[in-house]
Image (cartoon, rainbow, N blue to C red):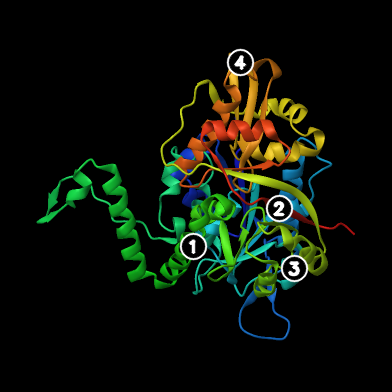
Amino acid sequence: MDKPMGFYVLTLFPEMIQKGCDNSILKRAMAQDHIRIQAINIRDYSGNRHGKVDDYTYGGGAGMLMQAQPVYDAWRDVVDHISQEKTDISEPSAKRVRTIYVTPKGEPFTQKMAKELAKEEELIFLCGHYEGIDERVLEEIVTDRVSIGDYVLTGGELPAMVMIDAISRLVPGVLGSEESAETETFENELLEYPQYSRPEVWHGKAVPEVLLSGDHKRIEEWRRIESERLTEKVRPDLFERYCRRQKVISALMRHKKENAYMIDSLMRDMADILYADENVVAAVHRVTRVVMLCLDSPEEFEKLQPFLPEDCHLILHNCEALAPILEEKLGMKAGDACYQSVYTQKNSLSVAYKNIGLFPASKLDYAVENYGGESEREYLKDRIENKELFAAFEGDRIIGFAGSHAGGSLGILYVDPEYRRSNVGSSLACYLVNLALDRGGLPYAHIRVSNEASLKMQEKMGLYLGKKKIFWMYKKEN
């Protein structure tokens, strides 16, 4: 079983956390070892025999302030505990543990932030009281300052529990159905559509006829329209962003096979638009931080350059003549030139070899040995942990594997030599295409121009090659 995600809450009221989280889905998730929640009493680290952890503020003013040392000692104890649980205790450091200070002065908590935090192995929440916490310890230990709204509460325990609840729902296994988390409010920047249960008529109000029709296509269309209508009415700010994204996707779809790398990320709400006009689009992938550019001529780069992030280290683009400009202006160097294959249909592909499932974490060495060697170990481990690597089995033996890259493209394909003419490779590839379709994306793959075998397999499966090549550019190392 995978290691449960750990939530550690530094608080003056641990019983509040324990009682608040010992209910419903969170209770079940802890019992099934998907998550664990531990409340740490900051008073236990006070040097005062009465457990006093606050004092007057320098400079005067009303109220008391939580002192730095007890907070630091409590945090340090948690970090040391986390380190001791690691397999290699020499690797982790305190800086790697995300520590969230719950404060109305922080960045607003959103569903996107919840998704990001759900990828962590552990999170530490720091709950303030009184007039807050000594700034010096915050500067030393806190990685994120987060707010759940523009109002003030008596302490950070309730906001911490709100965030733990939202994040836990995104941890694999907690909800029991991955679809439950993927179709809820705020997914794809839309509020969730209205839902109905029995009886069909209640207080004279009938369930909408379309929901009783059994026509799944009509039902999905009705739900989309209702989500759009409700979002426009209640959250016009979200609706404006949604409409902008749909407009950009629509423009990119005119050349679907050339722009799939950007279309897929936008369709699955995995990228933020940096700049967009009729012919030029720049976006950044939220997880990989890859900057994606779509432009017809290198001269158009001037339009979007001011919008690129300062930490731009990896660029994917479709304009061959752009390379010298990126090298001169951003210090980038040319990487791989690829063809892009795209599956443009909506129907699923037939998977000839059926014995395919998640790649087992215990077989990481096998993946490393057959795909890239030790330099790819951490990346393959990440793909396995994110349930993005799949294996073909003969009994208990793995005979091949394939997975999706962090940016969304299909790849990481390997098949044992003795099975390379038995539909195993194409079945793994078809399996990934169907999975991408189920997730609402546009299945695509990047194939090096020299990889003729893979190009032929993709075309045989029914994927189409774009007319233009795409190019990777990397930040030069000093």
Would residue 186 be found to the left or right of residue 118 on screen? left
> How far apart are the two marked residues, 4 and 3, measured between alpha carbons?
50 Å
Near-viewer residue (37 or 443): 443
Q: Horizontally, is 190 left or right of 368 in the view?
A: left
Q: Which residue is mark 4?
A: 396
Residue 212 in sight in this render: yes
Where's residue 135, x and y in %?
A: 72, 72
What residue is shown at x 74% (from left), y 60% (from top)? Answer: 72
Task: Specify which label sits upstream in the sequence, 3 or 1.
Answer: 3
Check disc 3 and report the residue beneath it: 139
Q: Which residue is mark 2?
A: 471
Toward which corner of the image does residue 225 lie, by quadrant?
Answer: bottom left
Which image quadrant for residue 315?
Answer: bottom right
Q: Position of residue 87 (x, y in %)?
A: 76, 35
Query: Residue type at mark 3?
Result: Glu
Please rate how many residues cluster around mark 2, counting C-alpha atoms within 10 Å: few if below 14, some from 14 to 19, many from 20.
Answer: many
Q: Which one is in front, 148 or 347? A: 347
How many C-alpha atoms fall within 10 Å of the one at disc 4: few (<14), some, or many (≥20)? few
State whether residue 402 is above or below residue 341: above
Residue type, numbered disc 1: Ala
